[in-house]
Image: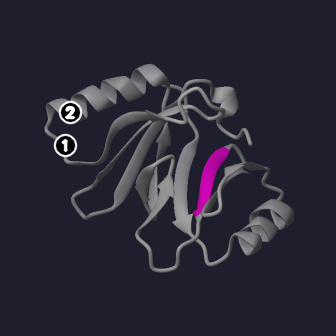
């Protein structure tokens, strides 16, 4: 398997401040965003800064996404094989395997579940890897 981009979503107190630090100071190009989150191309890896203070989730394409969370961007076939294995094992998903942003820039298959210690994990695959950091 080819090394794939890492994905980390983390809480920030202010998106303007996060944009100044990650975008301006570190030089990380910005990708898609909303009023509550922004994607950064962190040297080939996907960082997502989420606002919300004490919130434990943020709305993304009609779903409540756990914050913080981490994971990896898989190729679609690998994502599907993992989803099938987790479903067969009776995994308790925080978000069932699904496709979000269907037909839009950044269309992606995604699923969320927690490890035994309660850490939220997201595994996803983009319909087109060229859209990972698209805005």
Q: Is residue 71 magenta?
A: no
Q: Which mark is residue 112?
A: none
Query: Which of the 4 quarters of the picture holds residue 103?
Result: top right
Q: Is residue 101 left or right of residue 124?
A: right
Q: Is residue 101 above or below residue 36?
A: above
Q: Going 81% across and 69% down the picture, which residue do you hit?
A: 20
| Image x and y of residue 5, in percent | 58, 40
Q: Which mark is residue 87?
A: 2
| Image x and y of residue 38, in percent | 66, 57
Q: Is residue 55 above or below residue 47?
A: below
Badge 2 marks a residue whose secondary structure is helix
Q: Distance between the Cα atoms at labels 2 and 1?
A: 6 Å
Q: Is residue 49 above or below residue 31?
A: below
Q: Is residue 36 left or right of residue 42?
A: left
- In contact (CB < 8 Å): disc 2 and disc 1: yes
The part of the chain drawn in magenta is 45-49
Badge 1 marks a residue whose secondary structure is loop
The residue beneath circle 1 is 91
Q: Is residue 97 left or right of residue 129?
A: left
Quadrant of the snapshot with the C terminus? top right
Question: Pointer 1: residues within 10 angstroms few (<14), some, or many (20+)?
Answer: few
Q: Going 27% across and 55% down the picture, which residue do you hit?
A: 115
**Which residue reaches farthest front?**
62
**Which residue reaches farthest top?**
77
| Image x and y of residue 43, in percent | 72, 48
| Image x and y of residue 91, in percent | 19, 43
Kindly report the secondary structure that dominates the magenta region of the rendered protein. Answer: strand
């Amino acid at each position: 398997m080819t090394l794939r981009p890492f994905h980390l979503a983390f809480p920030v107190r202010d998106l303007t401040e996060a944009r100044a630090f990650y975008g301006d100071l570190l030089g990380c190009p910005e990708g898609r965003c909303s009023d509550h989150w922004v994607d950064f191309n962190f040297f080939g890896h996907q960082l997502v800064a989420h606002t919300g203070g004490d919130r434990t989730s943020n709305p993304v394409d009609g779903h409540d996404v756990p914050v913080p969370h981490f994971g990896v961007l898989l190729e679609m076939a690998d994502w599907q094989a993992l989803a099938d294995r987790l479903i067969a094992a009776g995994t308790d998903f925080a978000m069932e395997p699904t496709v979000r942003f269907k037909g839009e820039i950044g269309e992606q298959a995604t699923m969320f579940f927690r490890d035994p210690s309660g850490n939220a994990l997201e595994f996803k695959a983009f319909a087109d890897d060229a859209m990972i950091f698209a805005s």
